[in-house]
Image (spheres, rainbow, N blue to C red):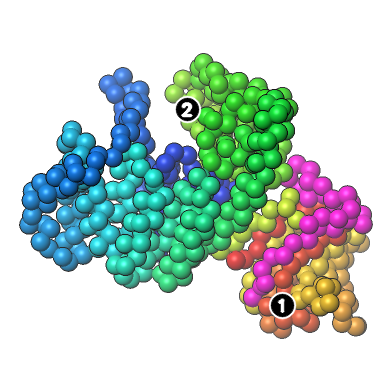
Amino acid sequence: MQMKMRKSLAGWCLCGVLVYGGTVPFFIRTAVAEDAKAKPAAKNSKKTADNKPKIIEKVPVPEDAVIEKVRAVVRDTFREGFSKTEPEDRLALASEIMSVVDKHDDVAAKYVMLSEAMDLAAKAGSAEDAADALEKMNQLFVIDLPARRQALLENVSKNAKGDEQEADLAEAYIDLCIEASRQDQFTTASNALDNAQKYALRSHDTVAKNLGKRIREKLKAQSRDYALLDQYRSKLDTTPDDPEANWKIGSYIAFWNENWKDAVPYFMKSSDKLVKSLAWMEKNPQAGRFLLMAADGWWELADRKEQEDVREKILAHAETLYTQAMPSLTGLLKTKAEKRLERLQEIRDESTAELLSGKQKINLSELKMTGKATMVENILDLPLKSTASTKILPMRSGQKIQIRQEPCAGSSISLWGIEKNRKRQIALKIYFNFDDKKIEFSSPNVSDTLVKYDLPQTFERNSRSVLSIELKKSEIRILMSNNANKTTFKYKNQVPSEDVQGIEFSGPARIISVIVDR
């Protein structure tokens, strides 16, 4: 069922999670769905004769009395189809009705036909077909999308059968979670995510399950930021030009609500000169080159941000601006924009592959740090007597931790297990001496367990290395590699794999990335 995760993956995959814009996913393009290019997501615009997008103005939902009169006409028109109750017949009728929606100018007729198509798809247990009708309705009418989707999925869930339909239902609940979170409806978002996880497990959909775990982490971060908004709004009531308050509110609106237009006025009062100048460009776009300058600026700003969530969403916005600028660019400027867009697609593909494999990249900037630990150019820099740690699983036998690091003599990595009397029980400590080309393993809570290995003489001590730690029931296997060598070590495990709950780095060390199995 992994091939089904098109919309949600496209919307959330960039460095782990890339949010999408608009009311429906603005991309359907991932490594998971090869048909994505042929099926772009719907937007609230149409192309006119001069190839410029024409915005479709949404209209209110017709009055109930009008809806009932039109419904009687629609059901009479499709009388034969409505008389059939098999799931495949209902889906066929829903498809037939959807095919004629755009042929009618009558607003009430459009609304009723879309409602009927949604109901037919729901009774057939098809979340995907029901969602198509709902998204079309959202393009044309002013509706409460999260509330509508929630009610629709409740009906679908009563009729969904088999792995395929339940996998579609998991994806649809993820879409509901995303929509609700954009409107700060955290209870709805959390409940939707619970349902997404339930149907992902029932349908054995690994991608939906992994994606759901990541989204839950993002929801927690968003709710923390939301809790701080009132104090910043109060600050602006007394000091409207306060730089920090304007940045915090603008950031929330842009990054979490995905409403960059409303965020710009706040960014224009930010204390960050780059953000302020970019906001003026956004407020007064003049040409493709101007949009390119704004995109370049946001790209530069993303590199400066330590928080991964912020970087992801700034890059997503930069991508939007590069795409908008492309038609009017030529020569080297166009080449530059193309290269940036290609790189963003590579990042998305890497993140999609990571989801498929069930692995997750740890956000180094969010580790618990002591001493003078800092993030320098996306690398965790740990001077002597400083540490950084995180709770990672607990692990299971057969899972792996992959660590990329720069060589630092005297650095160490500890896997810690169950906590006793508020103290961590160290399962394994790995000590590196790159100068002497040695690596040592020990279990500090178990006596006489020190084991030393000599690294190969050809091991390049000044090159970045990759450490892959695989937990087994009776041992820990370690694969260490760099440009010149791959070396495998085995160490008798003193603590069961399932008791390993976290990892700690001790300086001096420079950690590039940490990826763990999920």
Stretch of the chain drawn in magenta: 368-396
Element class at badge 2: helix
Front-lying residue, 217 or 359: 217
Place residue 312 in its image quadrant. top right
Q: Residues within 10 Å of mark 1 (few under 14, many from 20)?
A: some
Residue 342 point in image, percent of width and height: 53, 38
Residue type at mark 2 is: Gln
Task: Name the residue rendered at 64%, 77% in the picture.
Answer: 397
Residue 28 point in image, percent of width and height: 41, 46
Task: Name the residue rendered at 56%, 61% in the picture.
Answer: 213
Q: Does the magenta-highlighted stretch encompass residue 421?
A: no
* Inter-mark Cα distance, 2 to 1: 51 Å
Residue 238 point in image, percent of width and height: 70, 29
Name the quadrant of the N terminus.
Answer: bottom left
Q: Disc 2 marks which residue?
A: 324
Q: Is residue 456 left or right of residue 323?
A: right
Mark 2 or mark 1, earlier in chain: 2
What is the total number of numbered labels drawn onto the structure image?
A: 2
Front-lying residue, 154 or 287: 154
In the image, is residue 93 above or below residue 428? above
Q: Disc 1 marks which residue?
A: 499
Element class at badge 1: helix
In the image, is residue 317 above or below residue 369? above
Residue type at mark 1 is: Asp
Task: Name the residue rendered at 46%, 59% in the picture.
Answer: 192
Q: Is residue 47 left or right of residue 77?
A: right
Callout 2 touching callout 1 (CB < 8 Å): no
Residue 502 point in image, percent of width and height: 74, 67
Q: Residues within 10 Å of mark 2 (few under 14, many from 20)?
A: some
Residue 141 tag number: none
